[in-house]
Image (cartoon, rainbow, N blue to C red):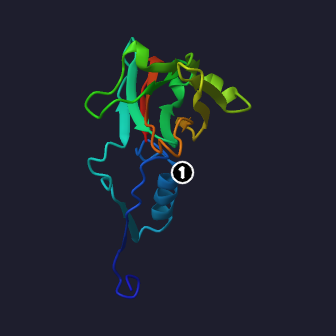
Amino acid sequence: IAVRENKKCIINISLGLMDGAPHDGKTMVEKAIDNYCYENPNVLVCVSAGNNGNTWKHWGTDAVHSDSSFGFFKCSYRASMYFAIPKQYSKTLRISVGDAKYGGQYEPYISPDSMYYQSPFVTIDSLINSSYPITFVSYTPDGRLSSNITLTAAHANDDYDELILTTDEKTSTPANMFDEHLYRFIFKGTGSVHGWF
């Protein structure tokens, strides 16, 4: 219709992505849209930038604090977080993940006796160079399997590397269907990180 009427064609798409990149115009999808519009100057593509509202899906820092920057998420069963890390920081940033018993929404357990496990720190670069994902296993104080915590990383594009953190909680049972855990991820080093739950 736009061609027939000699007008510009405007395409509005609502991707609503919560993961996959830092949303700065440098992902493969964003570059493909840019290239398409460059090759077709009568086409303009608009992408929404706020579909998720205040859903608390994003965690990010402009700069990791000198001692550490951290965040929490709670879940039962399985969950994943996706992190985008500028390539120049993959050698300087390290991550550690902890598993703890979850209290209430306003009083999560973060005391030493509620902690089941805290993984060692690993650099993003070492995860990228690993042939396999790295899995850490945590146990409850009475020796039961608590969680599998898996980290994997790869080069995403020329600007960013990606890190995926997956938690697989093992204490939910038919009698206790949703045994929520509180997971804490800690970044140390130099650089910036953005993550999506």
Q: Farthest right residue? A: 131
Question: What amino acid is labelled 1 in the image?
Answer: Met
Residue closest to the eye, 110 or 64? 110
Tell me if 131 is positioned left or right of 189 in this view: right
For residue 162, say whether it is visible.
Answer: no
Q: Quadrant of the N terminus?
A: bottom left
Q: Who's the residue at 60% across and 32% down the image?
A: 150
Q: Position of residue 58 (x, y in %)?
A: 36, 40
- Provide residue 78's location: percent of width, then percent of height: 53, 42
The quadrant in which residue 143 appears is top right
Visible in this render: residue 26?
yes
| x then y, percent, for residue 25 | 43, 47
Q: What residue appears at the point 49 percent right and 32 percent down from the top-left corner?
A: 85
- Look at the picture and state if 17 lies above or below 125: below
Residue matched to label 1: 28
Residue nearer the viewer, 151 or 142: 142
Residue 29: image x %, image y %?
A: 51, 55
Q: In the rendered picture of this protein, how many numbered marks are placed on residues? A: 1
Q: Say which residue appears at 37% left-offset and 23% top-offset.
A: 63
- Specify few, some or many for label 1: CA neighbours under 10 Å numbering under 14, 14-19, or 20 or more: few
For the point 37% across and 63% down, the residue is 14
Mark 1 element type: helix
**In the picture, which quadrant includes the C terminus?**
top left
Relative to the observer, which residue lies in front, 18 or 6? 18
